[in-house]
Image (tube, grey):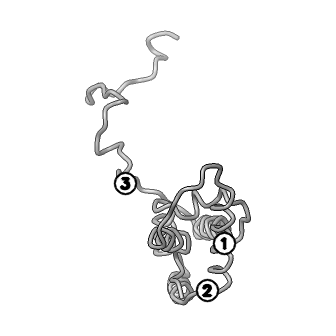
């Protein structure tokens, strides 16, 4: 590649060490994202499927994720159907709760090295997995 064809580099910014933590690239850094209403609907459906329809117990790693729950909350807030979704998700869902309790119990039974969990810990796990629905 000749000098004329070489891609330009921004010389105004100092070289940053990618291993160095900065607010701009940390886990809590924010980035604008533009989604169509169709993409918002698809993302919500995928997350709700993962939580309340996927039978695989390995999906619990994601179903109870605070980060994915945050994504679900944010896409619901910008959805054209947010009022309907807020109303719908404000009521306990007996089917989803039974499904989630059974999935959690299967997961606990499948552990190769079973961990002791208090009832309070189990309740918190269930609450995280049940988001956006409240427990009865």
Q: Compare marks 1 and 3 and give the one earlier in the sequence.
A: 3
Q: Residue at x 50, y 64 (%)?
A: 117
Left of 80 or right of it: where is 18?
A: left
Which residue is denoted by mark 2 in the rendering?
Answer: 93
Residue positioned 48% across, 73% down in the render: 119
Crowd band around label 3 with a 10 angstrom C-alpha radius: few (<14), some (14–19), many (20+): few
Q: Position of residue 90 (x, y in %)?
A: 51, 87
Residue 126 rendering spot, x and y as whole percentages: 54, 72
- Camera-near label (2 vs 3) is 2
Q: Which residue lies at the image location 60% right of the left edge and 64% below the top edge? A: 43
How far apart marks 1 and 3 lie (CA) works out to 28 Å
Q: Nearer the viewer, residue 100 or 91?
A: 100
Residue 78 shows in this picture: no
Tell me the crowding category of disc 1: few under 14, some 14 to 19, or many 20 or more residues within 10 angstroms, Cα based. many
Which residue in the structure is indicated by mark 1?
A: 52
Q: Quadrant of the C terminus?
A: bottom right
Q: Which residue is mark 3?
A: 30
Q: Are marks 2 and 3 in contact (CB under 8 Å)?
A: no
Q: In whole angstroms, how far apart are the C-alphas of marks 2 and 3?
A: 32 Å
Residue in view at x 27 percent, y 30 percent? 13
Q: Are marks 1 and 3 in contact (CB under 8 Å)?
A: no
Relative to 91, does residue 121 appear above or below in the rendering? above
**Mark 3, secondary structure of its residue:** loop
Of circles 1 and 3, which is in front? 1
- Foreground of the two, 72 or 51: 51
Residue toward you, 14 or 89: 89
């Amino acid at each position: 590649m000749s000098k004329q064809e070489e891609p330009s580099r921004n010389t105004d910014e100092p070289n940053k060490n990618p291993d160095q933590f900065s607010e701009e690239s940390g886990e809590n850094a924010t980035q604008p994202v533009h989604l169509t209403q169709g993409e918002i609907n698809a993302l919500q459906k995928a997350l709700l499927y993962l939580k309340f329809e996927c039978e695989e117990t390995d999906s619990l790693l994601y179903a109870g994720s605070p980060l994915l729950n945050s994504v679900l909350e944010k896409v619901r807030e910008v959805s054209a159907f947010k009022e309907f979704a807020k109303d719908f998700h404000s009521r306990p869902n007996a089917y989803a709760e039974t499904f989630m309790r059974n999935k959690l119990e299967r997961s606990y039974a499948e552990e190769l090295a079973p961990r002791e969990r208090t009832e309070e810990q189990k309740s918190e796990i269930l609450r995280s997995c049940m988001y956006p629905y409240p427990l009865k």
